[in-house]
Image (cartoon, rainbow, N blue to C red):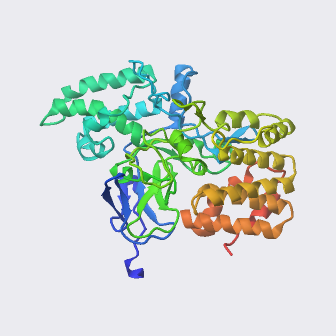
Amino acid sequence: DDDDELDLAYPNPSTLATIQSDKLMEVQDDDTKGRGFYALKDLKAGTRLVVAKPLAMVMGSELEALEDMDGGDEEEEDLDSDDGNEVDGKPTPAAKATKTPESDDDGSDTGEIEATGTKQNGIIILRLLQKLSADPSLWTDQLSTLFPRDEESALDLPTWLCSDVMIGMEIERQFNELPLLNLFKDNNESICKEIQLRLPLVVRYNVLSMETAPELFVHPDVENGGMSELSGTGLYGSEVSYFNHSCEPNVSRYCIGDVMFFVTNRSVKKGDELCFSYIEHEFLCESAEKRTLLLDMNFTDSDDGGKERPNKRQKTAAGTASVKGSDDDIPLPLIDVDMQSELMATPLMERLELIEELLEPEEPLDPEQDYKCDKYQLTILHAITLDGLGRTSDALKEWESCVDFATKYFPPLDETTVALNVQAALCAHKDGKADIAKGHAKKAMEMHDALFGGGVERFRNRYEKEFLVKMRHRTEKEIASDVESLFSKMS
């Protein structure tokens, strides 16, 4: 009914913590899953559900500045880095690295607490404490409503301890001084103790990574219009925290700076739960055991969605750990950020040989141990390399293989699928295959419009620098001609 359509002309979110329509969804309790968001009406694909700004955040550039001041920290990875593949020596986000786990993989009890809490989470805790000291309602009205929602639940979780010693000491100092501020009229001391117990876990399990246009291959190349300086981590309010995880997500999220949008990526029926994936979409094709490893969320992911899943949020993944405690340990994906960077730093012909060796291993793949997404990531690197060598026909086959993978395993509307179709269109156009090129361009623009709106104009504006990525041998004049031929209208 058109009369019942929601007006999505949101006010400027810079003045609001969260903008949400009660007409679209509500929080409901489920005996097995806990609380979650459920649709109050049938929703079209591309429906905007929530626009939110974080309660506290830290940008990746801030972490880099801190590390420069400290003289670098070789022991701790930059967990906010969005480095993926590289083009011309610069990383591309086609195979985004997800966050490093904070928990102890082997689950052994050594009697000591391992400092695995990340630096960015420690900074967010400090910023929340500063805000809380000026406005105690931040705890009572917002933070206390987030998982873990009571002390009993918090005590069941691993203790959080910051891996950065200086930040950890400052957190402890501010926690010790908190009761002296007399922020709460009633039960001041007990509330302060609860904050000390729960706040680090609230941050650990509810923060979200923030990346502006992370799917673009130009994303990390700031000098040529990339967006990596607009990547970071933020803690959002309770209106966002009730989105549960699903291996078949019907919601996707994207950012413009620190403003986060939650959008349906497929049609949703009234009464359906609204969920997004806590892991990157390229991992959704993996087995339940592997997805559970990548989640690192103290709950088990399954294919039927019928598990009990607490409201936990921090993305995790690629590294060198494995699931232990069984005869057959499950490794993490082979093609992680370090492997991608190493390959893309190699000269073209040598890189091509290495990638093709990895794509055709001597021994057959083990479905219990090997990851489908590894081949997908390698195929992207293969396509980039072939394009760089001018072998456009061979590159097009690889780009189309990646598009097929994304179409099969990703949600129906997906920003990475858009980016892959763009590259396939440009490659096909250079190879003289006009009809194929126009087909990929049409898919890219239509999917982008469904997710982000704005038609061709917004698409062209968002992809302006992407078209100029030095992936294939084209002058700027030739690229401009390609763009006009492929991306001037939807039909």
Quadrant of the drawing holding the C terminus: bottom right
Question: Which percent across, then down, holds residue 107?
Answer: 45, 28
Q: Residue at x 57, y 59 (%)?
A: 411
Left-right relation of 191 to 263: left
Left-right relation of 296 to 369: left
Question: Which percent across, then down, holds residue 35?
Answer: 33, 53
Question: Which percent across, then down, holds residue 17?
Answer: 36, 51
Residue 310: quadrant of the picture: top left
Q: Is residue 420 visible?
A: no
Q: How many marks?
A: 0
Left-right relation of 424 to 289: right
Residue in front for this viewpoint, 153 or 56: 153
Residue in front for this viewpoint, 162 or 69: 162
Q: Is residue 442 above or below residue 330?
A: below
Residue 329: quadrant of the picture: top right
Q: Is residue 258 above or below residue 175?
A: below
Quadrant of the drawing holding the N terminus: bottom left
Q: Is residue 387 visible?
A: yes
Residue with the most extreme left position: 186
Question: Which percent across, then down, holds residue 194?
Answer: 24, 33
Q: Residue at x 22, y 31 (%)?
A: 192
